[in-house]
Amino acid sequence: MVITSPHNETVKDIRRLRQSKGDRALLEGPHLLSDALDAKLPLETVLVTPEARQRPDVAAILARLPRPPLEVDARILDRLADADSPRGLVAVARLPRPGLDALPVVSQGVYVFAEGLQDPGNLGALARSTEAFGGSALVLAPGSVHPNHPRALRASAGSLLRLPVATRSSLDALRTRLGALEPRCLALVPHGGDDLLGADLSGTLVLLLGAEGPGLSADALDGATGRLTIPFASPVESLNATVAAAVALFEIRRRRATAAVNPPA
């Protein structure tokens, strides 16, 4: 039986997840659903169009499901999805975001603490860079967009399904959580900090990142143990916050990889 009504209770429930702020996440398209299955996330519902289930890539994913999906008319699925093209497949997964007390404590780890991120796409890109360059976790201050927002999940290309993420957290609480490791909190600032290319990037680090425009709050800057600035050519005045974080994370990874191959005498 194919769902054809926009008033179907399952359809209405999924549509509400387009502004997700809770522990349930809307996964759109084969790539995210495949990543969710790899991560063994519990799936509540899977919707597929009759046309999509004939495609080999979708059929391979459906074969991995513990129970059959629900079929839905393509026009209904397109209307409930946040993406312009969900490619005929959406799912609802349980994706709780535990507090700081569940965050991994990693010696020599690199944590990203972000304030004021309002754009879901930027959050997704930040999570992707954090995972790609070996970050230990992403910590979001109160007021940031929720990591289960559909656009954030898509932009992360699966990273937000795997990376440890804590929400509504303070820098003081994060510092307490990592206390035994004596983390250094380094604020990324456009001007006036230590040059990233020559700074000490050893030990357990917390990178402090503010939203483009307002930047970091006075409290975060006061709580920082140091400041880092990325050198860039004029007349550019600053970098997008997520780009700056990616550059810093890459430099930390590069520096540590070099030190591992060529340890100091």
Image: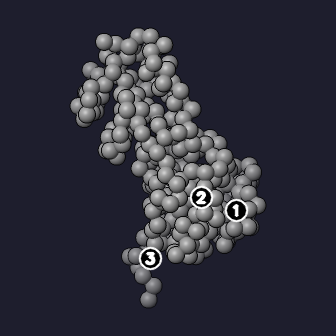
Sequence-wise first label, 2 or 1: 2
Instruction: Locate residue 258, reporting x and y percent.
Output: 44, 73
Q: Residue 262 versus residue 1: which sits nearer the camera?
A: 1
Q: Which residue is mark 2?
A: 113
Q: Mark 2 near mark 1, Cβ–Cβ under 8 Å?
A: yes
**One can see residue 29 in this view:** no
Residue depth check, mark 1 versus mark 3: number of the one nearer the observer: 1
Tell me if 59 is positioned left or right of 77 in this view: left
Sequence-wise first label, 3 or 2: 2
Within-10-Å neighbours for mark 1: few <14, some 14–19, many 20+ = many
Q: Mark 3 near mark 2, Cβ–Cβ under 8 Å?
A: no
Instruction: Locate residue 8, reporting x and y percent.
Output: 44, 15
Residue depth check, mark 3 versus mark 2: number of the one nearer the observer: 2
Amino acid bearing label 2:
Phe
Cα–Cα span, label 3 and label 2? 25 Å
Within-10-Å neighbours for mark 3: few <14, some 14–19, many 20+ = few
The circle on residue 220 is 1
Q: Which residue is mark 3?
A: 259
Q: Is residue 75 above or below residue 53?
A: above
- Image quadrant where residue 62 sits: top left
Residue that appears at 29% across and 22% down? 53
- Image quadrant where residue 247 sits: bottom right
Amino acid bearing label 3:
Ala
Q: Is residue 15 above or below residue 168?
A: above
Instruction: Locate residue 226, reporting x and y percent.
Output: 67, 71
Tell me if 57 is positioned left or right of 99 in this view: left
Q: The residue tagged with tag 1: helix, strand or loop?
A: helix
Instruction: Locate residue 253, reporting x and y percent.
Output: 47, 66
Amino acid bearing label 1:
Ala
Q: Is residue 159 above or below residue 102?
A: above
